[in-house]
C-alpha cells in the first residue's frame, strides 16, 4: 500500500484558515486606536474638525444672522467692530456670519468627493488586483488616462466648458479626477495580500470570490487606502477653494471660503480682514485633516510607533 500523499484529504487535511481572518485587522485597529489616544495632535485635529463639522451642519449655533441678512452698503468693507468681530464684507453683511456659513460647501464637497472616490477606488482596485489579467489591464490603462489629467487644471477646463454648474456638478468633476491614486494603492495592496496563506486556504476550502474579497482581503488591504483618503479630504477642500478663487467653482449666491477669497483679492491691501479670516479658517481646516491623516498613518504603521 502506497504512502498517503499530501493531496489525500484524510491523511493530510488542508489547513484551515484562522477562525476569523478579520481578527488580525481588528487587532491592528485596536492597537492603532490605543496609539491615537496617546497623541495630543490627534485630539487637537479631531476637535477642530468636529467643531468645523458642527459649524457646517448647524451654522445658526455660531452665527445669529444668515449669510445675507441685515446687509448695509454703508458699512461695506469696514473692519471689526462691536458685535461684528470679523467686520463686514463688500456688501455690508456681517463677515463672521459669512465665514461661518462658508464652512458648509467646503466640507460637504471635500467629504463627498473623498467618499465617492474611495468607493470607486476600492471597487476598481480590488477587481484589478484580485483578478489580474484583462481586468487589471483595462483598469490600469483607464487609471493612467485619468492620472494624466492635472487635478485643478483639468477641473478648471471641464467647469469652464459647462457653465451654470452647482455643488454636485463640482463634486462629480472632482471625483472623476480624484480616484486614481487611491485605486493604484488599493490594487497594489490587494496584489500583496491575495497570495497570503489564509487567502489560499480559504480558496482551497471552497470560499467564493466575494467572500474571499470581503472577509479575507479587504480587511487587510484597506488601511493604507483609508489613510490616503483622510489626507485627500484636505487636498480636495483646498482644490475646491482654488476653483472658487479662480471663478470657475461655486457661484454666488452660494457662500464659501474660496468665493470669499476671490472677492477679497481686489481689496486685501486696504481691507485685509476680507482675506485673513476665510484664509485662516480654510488653512486650519485643511491642516487639521492633513495632521489627522498623518496621525492615523503613524498609528497604523508599527514601524513608526
Image: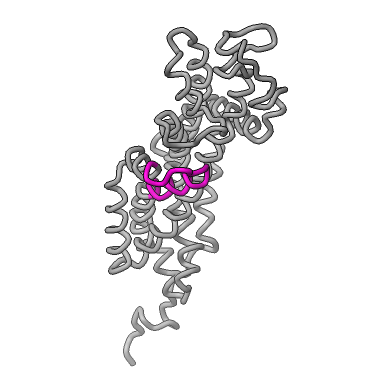
Front residue (pair 211, 144): 144
Q: Is residue 76 above or below residue 283?
A: above
Q: Quadrant of residue 60?
A: top right
| Residue at image coords 31%, 58% | 142
Q: Is residue 305 visible to the viewer in this orientation of the structure?
A: no
Front residue (pair 222, 233): 233
Please give left or right for residue 246 compared with residue 93 in the image. Answer: left
On whether residue 175 falls in the magenta region, the answer is yes
Q: Is residue 149 visible to the viewer in this orientation of the structure?
A: yes
Instruction: Specify the segment rendered in magenta.
Output: 160-179
Q: Quadrant of residue 93?
A: top right
Q: Quadrant of residue 245?
A: top left
| Residue at image coords 43%, 82% | 9
The N terminus: image quadrant: bottom left
- Indicate the position of residue 32 as horizontal and vertical percent values: 51, 40
| Residue at image coords 41%, 78% | 12
- Indicate the position of residue 41 as horizontal and vertical percent values: 52, 25
The C terminus: image quadrant: top left
| Residue at image coords 50%, 25% | 282
Amino acid at each position: 500500500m502506497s504512502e498517503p500523499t499530501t493531496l489525500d484529504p484524510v491523511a493530510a487535511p488542508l489547513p484551515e484558515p484562522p477562525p476569523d481572518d478579520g481578527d488580525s485587522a481588528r487587532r491592528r485597529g485596536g492597537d492603532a486606536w490605543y496609539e491615537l489616544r496617546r497623541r495630543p495632535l490627534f485630539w487637537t485635529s479631531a476637535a477642530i474638525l468636529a467643531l468645523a463639522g458642527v459649524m457646517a451642519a448647524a451654522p445658526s449655533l455660531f452665527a445669529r444672522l444668515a449669510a445675507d441678512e441685515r446687509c448695509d452698503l454703508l458699512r461695506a468693507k469696514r473692519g471689526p467692530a462691536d458685535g461684528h468681530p470679523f467686520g463686514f464684507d463688500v456688501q455690508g453683511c456681517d463677515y463672521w456670519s459669512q465665514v461661518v456659513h462658508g464652512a458648509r460647501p467646503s466640507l460637504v464637497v471635500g467629504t463627498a468627493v473623498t467618499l465617492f472616490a474611495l468607493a470607486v477606488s476600492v471597487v476598481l482596485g480590488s477587481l484589478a488586483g484580485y483578478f489580474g489579467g484583462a481586468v487589471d489591464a483595462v483598469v490600469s490603462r483607464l487609471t493612467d488616462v485619468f492620472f494624466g489629467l492635472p487635478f485643478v487644471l483639468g477641473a478648471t477646463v471641464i467647469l469652464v466648458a459647462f457653465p451654470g454648474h452647482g455643488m454636485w456638478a463640482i463634486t462629480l468633476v472632482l471625483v472623476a479626477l480624484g480616484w486614481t491614486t487611491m485605486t493604484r494603492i488599493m490594487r497594489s495592496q490587494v496584489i500583496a495580500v491575495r497570495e497570503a496563506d489564509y487567502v489560499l486556504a480559504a480558496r482551497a476550502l471552497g470560499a467564493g470570490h466575494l467572500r474571499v474579497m470581503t472577509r479575507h482581503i479587504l480587511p487587510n488591504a484597506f488601511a493604507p487606502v483609508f489613510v490616503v483618503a483622510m489626507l485627500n479630504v484636505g487636498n480636495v477642500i483646498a482644490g475646491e477653494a482654488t476653483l472658487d478663487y479662480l471663478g470657475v467653482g461655486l457661484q454666488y449666491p452660494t457662500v464659501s471660503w474660496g468665493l470669499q477669497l476671490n472677492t477679497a483679492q481686489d481689496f486685501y491691501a486696504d481691507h485685509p480682514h476680507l482675506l485673513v479670516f476665510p484664509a485662516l479658517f480654510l488653512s486650519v481646516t485643511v491642516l487639521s485633516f492633513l495632521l489627522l491623516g498623518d496621525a492615523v498613518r503613524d498609528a497604523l504603521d508599527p514601524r513608526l510607533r
